[in-house]
């Protein structure tokens, strides 16, 4: 098995009382680079900068089940209650599903 490589990350921020942004959680996407290259290398060519800017490549990485992917979620806001986290996650995932 190959060591997964960080392929992307993001931070979920929420505005608190309309004045301050609080980082709620961070999410990292790790991908088996060798497996991804085998599965998608024939479709995507170019230098690292061109590939990094190619949304179609990211969409294929997420959609493919031909190689291993891992999500790592880290709670950033220490005072977060479980229900608040679930609400923030559902709010974000619901928005993504509606697009």
Image (spheres, rainbow, N blue to C red):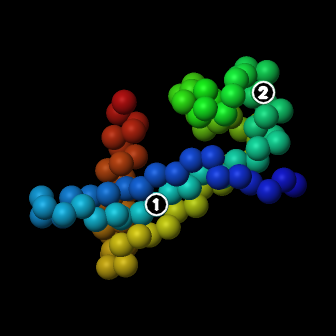
Give the percent coordinates (x, y) of residue 68.
74, 47
Give the percent coordinates (x, y) of residue 85.
36, 65
Residue bearing mark 2: 41
Give the percent coordinates (x, y) of residue 2.
84, 53
Name the residue at the left extreme: 18
Q: Is residue 16 left or right of residue 83?
A: left
Identified at 52% across, 51% down, the residue is 9
Identified at 33% across, 40% down, the residue is 95
Residue bearing mark 1: 26
Identified at 52% across, 62% down, the residue is 73
Where residue 57 is drawn, which disc sits there? none
Q: Is residue 70 left or right of residue 4?
A: left
Q: Earlier in the sequence, mark 1 or mark 2?
A: 1
Please say whether residue 60 is visible from this viewpoint: no
Circle 1 residues within 10 Å: few <14, some 14–19, many ≥20 = some
Please say whether residue 46 is visible from this viewpoint: yes
- Is 63 drawn above or below residue 86 in the view shown? above
Circle 2 residues within 10 Å: few <14, some 14–19, many ≥20 = few
Name the residue at the right extreme: 1
């Amino acid at each position: 098995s190959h060591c997964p490589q960080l392929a992307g990350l993001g931070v979920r921020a929420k505005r608190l009382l309309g004045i301050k942004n609080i980082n709620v959680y961070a999410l990292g996407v790790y991908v088996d680079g060798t497996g991804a290259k085998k599965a998608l290398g024939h479709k995507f060519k170019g230098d690292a900068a061109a590939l990094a800017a190619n949304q179609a490549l990211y969409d294929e990485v997420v959609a493919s089940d031909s190689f291993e992917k891992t999500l790592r979620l880290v709670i950033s806001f220490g005072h977060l209650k479980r229900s608040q986290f679930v609400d923030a996650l559902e709010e974000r995932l619901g928005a993504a599903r509606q697009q």
